[in-house]
Image (cartoon, rainbow, N blue to C red):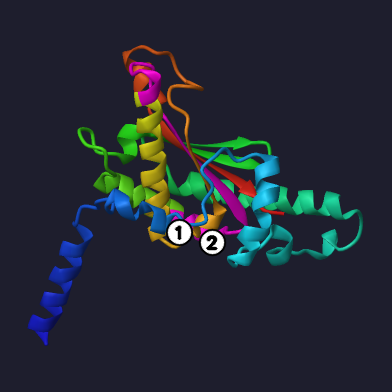
Amino acid sequence: MKIKNLFLISVLLVAGCVTYHSPDRDTWGTYLRGASFDSMTETSRTAKRPVFLGAGGKTISQIKHSEKYEYGDKATNDTALAVAYMADLEFALYDALRKPGISVQRAGTDVVVILVRDAIMELDVADISRDGADTLKTISKILNKYDATFIEIAGYTDATRDTRAANALSSDMASRTAVFLAQHDIIPQRMFIVGRGSSRPIAAQDDVGRLTNRRVEIRISPAR
């Protein structure tokens, strides 16, 4: 019995040390079937809502209700529910992601997780690192709990590459992240995936700033 228990413990330890590798690019379409490959806007969320609901998605008002919102204007009540729901989501992400290179910010009713590339990707190859996999598992777990949301996964690069290369690299980062989330039970019908190249820098284009501009942003918006 002791030998058997030691064997099981060894297997678990080895499994916990296995490095994650993205699946073959040829299979990404299977994981991301139902995702949208464009920016998440109010119009695109409205258009995607029937697909999202048809895939088992729910709106915030369907899963969160309080007697104090029972009366009054529906739009006002839905907004109040969304604000409270997203505040809880923001706190959960902030509390779980206290790591270098990662920040959680509020943008209106949306929540944005900024993941500097070096915090989630291998330094010398285009793939998710072991630490990055742990971080994305944490994010997936929280997003599965707060599932009445749409998700935009956007990749960004610095300005050292030409436009075509920058767009390709940023799309690769966004898609790899999206595939990982899909492998961890995030339905692709929630996702908007986009590579924005070197646009929208958030830091100077010097040696230090470029490290910050290479990033993946996960923008989370309430479904209502």
Residue type at mark 1? Lys
Residue at 77% in and 48% down = 79
Question: On residue 145, which mark appears?
Answer: 2
Q: Give the residues drawn in magenta, as a range.
A: 140-164
State the residue lying farthest toward the bottom: 1
Residue 147's image quarter?
Answer: bottom right
Residue 145 visible in the snapshot: yes
Disc 1 on helix, strand or loop? helix
**Mark 2, other Cα within 10 Å: few <14 / some 14–19 / many ≥20:** few
Q: Is residue 1 left or right of residue 197?
A: left
Q: Position of residue 126 (x, y in %)?
A: 26, 38
The image quarter in which residue 39 lies: top right
Q: Is residue 115 left or right of residue 86?
A: left
Q: Which mark is residue 141?
A: 1
146 left or right of 4?
A: right
Q: Quadrant of the N terminus?
A: bottom left
Front-most of residues 81 and 35: 35
Residue 157 seen in the figure: no
Q: Residue at x 42, y 54 (%)?
A: 181
Please tell me which residue is depicted at 71% across the width and 51% down the height of the picture: 82
Note whether 156 is above or below 53 in the view shown. above
Instruction: Name the residue nearer the viewer: 103 or 176.
Output: 176
- Marks 2,1: beta carbons within 8 A: yes
In the rendered view of the protein, which quadrant contains the C terminus?
Answer: bottom right
